[in-house]
Amino acid sequence: MVSAPGKVIVYGEHAVVHGKAAIAAALSLRCYLLVTPLPKTAHKLTLRFPDIGLDHSWDIELLPWDTFSAPGKKKYYFDTVERLDNQLMNEIKPLVADIPGKVLQASAVAFLYLYLMLGSKYAPASIYTLRSTIPIGAGLGSSASISVCLSTALQLQMGTLATPFNGMMSNETQLQLKRINNWAFVGEMCIHGNPSGVDNTVATGGKAVLFKRTDYSLPPQVTHMSNFPELPLLLVNTKQPRRTSEQVANVHSLLSAHPEITNSLLDSIDRITLDAHRIISNPEFSAQPGSMDLVQLGELIRINHGLLVSLGVSHPKLERIRELIDYTGIGWTKLTGAGGGGCSITLLKPNVKQNVLDDLDTKLSKEGFEKYKTTLGGDGVGVLWPAVIRADKEVEITQNMFLAADGVEGVEDLVGVGAIGKGNQGWRFWREWIPVGSEFTLH
């Protein structure tokens, strides 16, 4: 089993579209992928994603192996792929034509493209079962989490990745993370066409990144914030559908109508992001109760939200959530992502009383909102191999157990990163990355 986190934009959304900086951090909500090998005589490849209603099989021998392995087409696990091959995409489209819905088809295309590049027609037949505790389509990087899981699982199956272990050399850890990330980006291209690469980078390496892209003809600058602290977070889903493109267009229109004022707002958001990065990067940073660093980060979150409201990308439901949370005084709240719906995040103050959270949960549920108590800045991609529960004795995590897990809590209780023994006897993570403050190219 492999797992990768979702992500939230903590500071800088919308400004990042205009060449400013943004900070994106890993979310403790995660995607989990269980790989179940079948007998060699099965010849079937199955993708199951019950959370979105996808369950489809293909005959391995009938997949377009010849086209994918042709000279000039075949790519290897150590290769960098910066764009999709249209001929190969056209070979895949008939294989997903009978799958209903664009979301389901896009997931299947990403899976098949990666499988045909990284897999082998002689590999054992397998069932790939995905479960996600990340709300789908809420701007929380669920597709990138899936792509990272697929990239990792296929490379582990093919023997081109080593399971992480204590003592793995730093340069080898970084190399493996780069390979996971490169192929996860390919999966993201299959789903989104022209993704920024931020989501898969955070899902791969965990913690947080400072992201900036001033020239869209070049890869972005991504600085990994490996000392980003694990911070308690309240995530609330408005369940209000939104289109990122519409919100981005609204800001463009405001920029055209009021260039001086709008640029001033975008510059202020940029300064907020860079100030947050400065605070967190300070070797003496503290997130302990009573810490002024934590208060400053919270104030920057509140100010960032106010500027986003001024840009016109909030929504009455987001403002209602902020009103309910502000009334309790439990933390600092802002929208995250494109706005116009989607989710809000609240950086929680220390020692929040449980009865206050319970009362807030009741009020949010009554108004149709969905609350998740999570953390920011946790681990990136991890592997549980063999996929077993370790209690008094090892118990194999079967297909039926995994599929029967009920909702977010059921999945977390069964296979959650925090639910099974840690260290070498449980989930293992490629924890090292590029040194703090350094930059690396996404591809």
Image: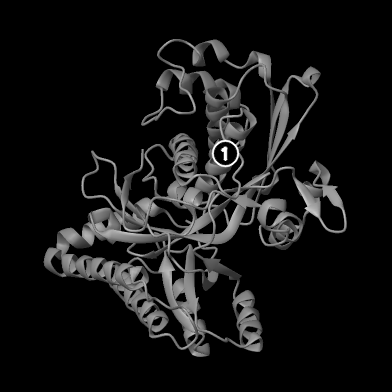
What secondary structure is found at the residue carrying circle 1? helix
Q: Residue at x 72, y 61 (%)?
A: 419
Residue occupying image coordinates x 50% and y 86%: 289
Q: Which residue of the protein is positioned furthest toward the right in this rendering?
A: 392
48 vs 76: above or below:
below
Q: Nearer the viewer, residue 287 or 135?
A: 287
**Quarter the N terminus occupies:** top right
Q: Position of residue 315 (x, y in %)?
A: 41, 69
Looking at the picture, which amino acid does disc 1 mark? Answer: Thr
The one of 350 and 261 positioned closer to us in this rendering: 350
Total numbered labels: 1
Front residue of 255 and 236 = 236
User: Can residue 388 be seen in the rendering of this structure?
Assistant: yes
Where is residue 178 drawn, in percent x and y?
Answer: 44, 40
Q: Check the image and report above or below for 300 versus 184.
A: below
Question: Where does the image place residue 429, in percent across and percent down from the top left?
Answer: 58, 51
Position in image of residue 363 (x %, y %): 61, 81
Judge whether 164 appears above or below 270 on screen: above
The colour mode here is one colour
Q: Is residue 138 visible?
A: no
Q: Is residue 303 left or right of residue 44?
A: left
Q: Is residue 310 left or right of residue 417?
A: left
Quadrant of the rendered image containing residue 116: top right
Q: Residues within 10 Å of mark 1 (few under 14, many from 20)?
A: many
Front position in the image: 219 or 287: 287
Question: Taking 352 as reference, is 10 above or below it?
Answer: above
Q: Quadrant of the C terminus?
A: top left
Write down the residue under mark 1: 152
